[in-house]
Image (cartoon, rainbow, N blue to C red):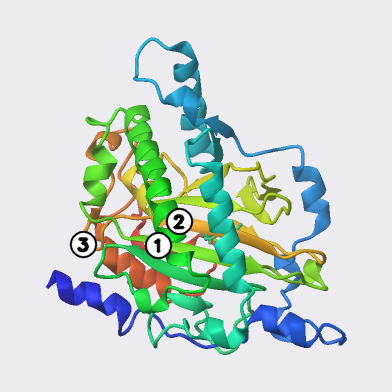
Amino acid sequence: MAAASANSFVNPKWSKVIPVESVQELVKNHAHSHEAVPGRYIRSQEERPTTSSLLVSLQTAIPVIDMKKLSNLPGQDYQRQQEMVRLSMACQDWGFFQIVNHGIPHSLIDEIKGVAKEFFNLPLQEKQKYAPQEGDVQGYGKTFVVAEDQTLDWGDLLALALMPDSLKNLTLWPTVPTNFRDSVERYAIAVERVAQELLSLFAENLNLEATDYFKEKFGSEPMNLMRMNLYPPCPTPELVLGLSPHSDGGGLTLLLQDDETVGLHVRKDNQWIPVQPIPYGLVVNIGDLLEVMTNGRYKSVEHRAVTNAERARLSIALFYNSGMDAEVAPASKLVDEQHPCLYRKFKHEEYIRYYLKRQLKGKHPLADFAKLDISNT
Ligand SMILES: O=C(O)CCC(=O)C(=O)O
Ligand SMILES: [Fe+2]
């Protein structure tokens, strides 16, 4: 039974895949034309990334957490306690933070960015060898294009399932550059270790019975994905989005972003806050599954990517998720009279299917799928 459901990830039918043109190609082919940005990419007035809201929000920044301060054992270490409080606030108020001193070697970070750039710079025919088969969410192209008339994101991507082995489809893993696969494997192991460390810190902060509470709930085989996003420069960045607003559907996301180019925006108090890159830092955000497991204490927050006219921007996301068969439900310790149960229990696989059938559109999926009506209680 488990094997059958796992294989369906690779073959039929996770989502309808509507093939669309590569944005990199579009830019190349229309570089000198007035029609460089086709109508399908142009956003409605409300969705456009206006500059006025950016100016206001520049005063705010997502919290930065120093992992080194958290690496000691729990105890009387005052610095550690302070950083734990900051981490807790970050998860509750923002759903987003950046981490520094996480222990991932800088050389490995340079390497993964290097192979990703090399891949996207290959000729289109080479990249198309890794286009997904029907119904798959892995491979080179775009996911979440579910309707012919949908407004498109100004970006290309490569999505890879990292684990479990039954989902990993090596035929969609590039072999050029030659060190691509090896770099991805080593980078993934390093980031997964940091994700596990963060999950134990969350459990400690939430006073859950064991620091491996989430590790256990995620199951022995987490379902982890990597997504490399490439946003080419856009002649009219004020009219398009690189990635539509969405909350991440998984557990925890660790994102490596471009050092020089701001592009990620996080929604806070109805404003879009740009995330200033920290060289060799990682952006961490809470996904929908952790919002459910923490009964809403930690927030899975909407975010989007914008483009600019001058430079391409690369980001590499690692989604650390529960296993497919894992049951997702609020921790019973986080449900009481003051905190009624906000979400129903569900199987992770059900939510993936639901999430993938929809366009990336704000934070609605979780609310529609699992939120309980507590107005009468
Ligand atoms: O490119 C970015 O900064 C955001 C990427 C992202 O949100 C995602 O891949 O889910
Ligand atoms: Fe995201």
> Ligand 1 is found in which quarter of the picture?
bottom right
Quadrant (top left/top right/bottom left/bottom right) for the C terminus: top left
C-alpha separation, residue under disc 3 versus residue under disc 2: 20 Å
- Element under label 3? loop
**Mark 1 beta carbon near ligand 1 (under 8 Å):** no
Q: Which residue is mark 2?
A: 318
Number of the label disc, if any, that sits on residue 51:
none
Which one is earlier in the sequence, the residue at label 3 or at label 1? Answer: 1
> How far, Cα to Cα, is label 3 from label 1?
16 Å
Q: Give the x, y percent position of residue 88.
A: 46, 31
Task: Name above or below for residue 369 compared with residue 10.
Answer: above
Asked whether disc 3 touches disc 1, contact meaning CB atoms under 8 Å apart, the reply is no
Q: Is residue 241 visible?
A: yes
Badge count: 3
The x, y position of residue 136, in whole percent, is 38, 80
Residue under label 1, please give it: 225
Residue 5: image location, x then y, percent: 21, 74
Q: What element does badge 2 sit on? A: strand
Residue carrying label 3? 325
Which of 126/212 is in front? 126
Instruction: Single out the residue that lies furthest toward the left.
Output: 1
Q: Is residue 238 left or right of residue 248?
A: right
